[in-house]
Image (cartoon, grey):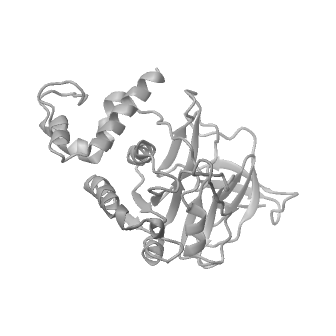
């Protein structure tokens, strides 16, 4: 009997592909019995990026797959709640070195509260995040001020911003270099160009590429599975996890008193608040509100924070 430890590289519901990284040689697997994560109430007990213990008789095949017997402890993970007030949560990926949040200013139009929810989740679960501003070839000179404002908001909050275009190649080399030696999560709203960026990073890959719906300038879902790809073939220089395009991102396991702790710029300013704890909404002597008024903290990020406070009340 063969036994070992491997990484989940594809999640197709109740069936999985595993690979003993850094070797890229995926093989099929299924869960053995009622394997669950301790204390987890997520809809998926196993996520792409999880390291698992497996066993099999001979070489695993589709008819005789390996059996996953244990899910090893995670170094981190990204999780979201459904947006319909359900308490159900879903783990997007585990053991991630860097999360690249792909956005586009116009095609589809960016939703800053959505972006901020992902960034807060990255902060909560210990995942480093970089923002990729894609489709910059479509922005005219009139967008320069808006791009600069976006960079000021998120650069000021401490997040790197990489501008990319899969048409002109702008930023692709820098992104490829940044992905080296890491397990990288690519996530974002439908239609922002995640799959196109992955193909630009490694033309040998063929993730599904979708088109924008002209009726609503909304992206169509093109990726239905959670899947990891090797960058550079069978001797990879890094890995990328592609996720389905997201249309909502609800916070999980976060008390309203804690939300401000995961806005880096608010956490820094909050040290000067007169009262502790401070909700940064109505208290006198609130250093965060003063920083917003002074333009040190962006009004957009502060409004996202207020929206998360309101969302938290709805789940209670």
Instruction: State left or right for residue 105 relative to residue 258.
Output: right
Quarter of the figure with residue 40: top right
The residue positioned 18% from the left and 24% from the top of the image is 283
Above or below residue 310? Residue 290 is: below
56 vs 256, nearest the viewer: 256
The residue positioned 51% from the left and 50% from the top of the image is 74
Give the quarter of the figure containing the N terminus. Answer: bottom right
Residue that extends furthest to the right in the rendered view of this protein:
63
Give x and y (percent) for residue 309: 37, 29
239 vs 251, nearest the viewer: 251
Give x and y (percent) for residue 312: 42, 27
Residue that extends furthest to the top in the rendered view of this protein:
316
The residue positioned 65% from the left and 52% from the top of the image is 220
Give x and y (percent) for residue 13: 73, 47
The residue positioned 38% from the left and 32% from the top of the image is 307
Quarter of the figure with residue 22: bottom right
């Amino acid at each position: 009997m063969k036994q070992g430890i491997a990484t989940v590289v594809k999640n197709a519901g109740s069936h999985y592909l595993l690979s003993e990284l850094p070797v890229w040689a995926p093989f099929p697997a299924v869960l053995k019995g009622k394997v669950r994560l301790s204390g987890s109430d997520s809809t998926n007990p196993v996520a792409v990026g999880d390291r698992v213990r497996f066993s099999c008789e001979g070489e695993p095949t589709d008819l005789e797959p390996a059996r996953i017997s244990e899910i090893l402890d995670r170094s981190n993970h990204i999780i979201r709640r459904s947006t319909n007030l359900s308490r159900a949560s879903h783990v997007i990926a585990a053991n991630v070195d860097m999360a690249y949040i792909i956005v586009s200013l116009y095609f589809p139009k960016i939703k800053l509260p959505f972006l901020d929810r992902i960034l807060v989740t990255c902060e909560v679960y210990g995942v480093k995040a970089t923002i990729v501003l894609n489709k910059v070839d479509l922005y005219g000179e009139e967008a320069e001020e808006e791009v600069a404002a976006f960079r000021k908001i998120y650069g000021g909050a401490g997040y790197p911003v990489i501008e990319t275009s899969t048409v002109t190649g702008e930023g692709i080399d820098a992104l490829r270099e940044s992905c080296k030696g890491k397990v990288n999560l690519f996530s974002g709203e439908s239609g922002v160009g995640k799959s196109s960026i992955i193909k630009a990073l490694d033309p040998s890959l063929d993730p599904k590429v979708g088109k924008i719906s002209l009726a609503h300038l909304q992206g169509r879902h093109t990726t239905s599975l959670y899947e990891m790809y090797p960058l550079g073939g069978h001797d990879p220089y890094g890995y990328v996890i592609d996720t389905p395009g997201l249309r909502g991102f609800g916070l999980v396991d976060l008390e309203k008193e804690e939300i401000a702790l995961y806005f880096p710029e608010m956490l820094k300013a909050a040290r000067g608040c007169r009262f502790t704890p401070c909700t940064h909404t109505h208290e006198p002597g609130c250093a965060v509100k003063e920083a917003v008024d002074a333009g040190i903290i962006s009004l957009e990020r502060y409004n996202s924070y207020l929206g998360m406070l309101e969302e938290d009340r709805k789940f209670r």
